[in-house]
Image (cartoon, helix red, strand yellow):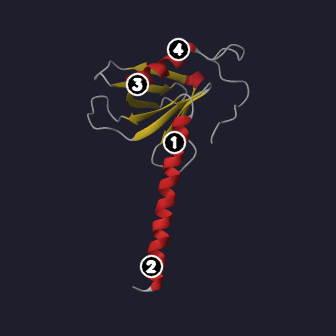
Amino acid sequence: MPSWLAWTLIGIAVIAFVTAVMIAWRLFMLLRTPGSFKARLVSKHDDEKPGKPVVVSYNEYSVEIFAVYSIWPRPFASVPRHSLDVTRFPRRTRIRAWVRLDDLETGAYLKLSAAQAHVSELTTWYESGPAVGIGHWREPPQRRQRRRYF
């Protein structure tokens, strides 16, 4: 085998390995963040097929949805808390639950399937409001909040 072919194959293997390590590290770091959990995007409510795996992260100001198999550090969807509406579907199984996140400003929505406990945490967070001292949480913030990315 020519040496250039061997070096090319080694280079491709190294790039694939580094990419896999970056994706695993990103998933690990996303799930370590408080208020984060694994979920799946559901295309239709009655669809039995599992959807695209995502990581849902909620913080004081928004819900952010990150793709699992990606090295892109920013979320592909983010809904500010003041324009969020959470609708929980009836439980279909003992383990999984469905939830719909509506953006009231744009009219866009996302349907998610996640563990029952995680959906309960998300709906509790939505209903509770933020800590005292930052104003009414249904109003948009006065200044733009700094996003937290690793």
Using the image, tell me which numbered label, if any, was put on residue 140.
none
Please report whichever mark, 1 or 2, sits nearer to the chain's N-terminal start.
2
Q: What is the distance, in whole Å, between disc 4 and disc 3 at their CAs?
A: 14 Å
Q: Assess disc 3: are there few (<14), some (14-19) or many (≥20) residues with their C-alpha within 10 Å of its C-alpha.
A: many
Q: Residue at x 50, y 57 (%)?
A: 19
- Label 2: which residue? 6
Q: Residue at x 36, y 20 (%)?
A: 89
Q: Position of residue 24 (x, y in %)?
A: 49, 48
Q: Is residue 37 left or right of residue 1?
A: right
Q: Position of residue 87 (x, y in %)?
A: 42, 20
In this view of the protein, which residue sits in the foreground, 113 or 86? 113
- Label 4: which residue? 127
Q: Mark 3 belongs to which amino acid?
A: Val
Please report whichever mark, 3 or 2, sits nearer to the chain's N-terminal start.
2
User: Which quadrant of the rendered structure holds the C terminus?
Assistant: top right
Q: What is the distance, in whole Å, between disc 3 and disc 2 at their CAs?
A: 50 Å
Q: Mark 4 belongs to which amino acid?
A: Glu
Label 3 vs label 2, nearer the camera: 2
Are the two marked residues, 1 and 2, in contact with CB atoms closer than 8 angstroms?
no
Q: Mark 2 belongs to which amino acid?
A: Ala
Please report whichever mark, 4 or 3, sits nearer to the chain's N-terminal start.
3
Q: What is the distance, in whole Å, between disc 4 and disc 2 at their CAs?
A: 59 Å
Q: Is residue 43 left or right of residue 16?
A: left
Q: What is the distance, in whole Å, between disc 1 and disc 2 at their CAs?
A: 33 Å
Label 4 vs label 2, nearer the camera: 2
- Label 1: which residue? 28
- Label 3: which residue? 99
Please report whichever mark, 4 or 2, sits nearer to the chain's N-terminal start.
2
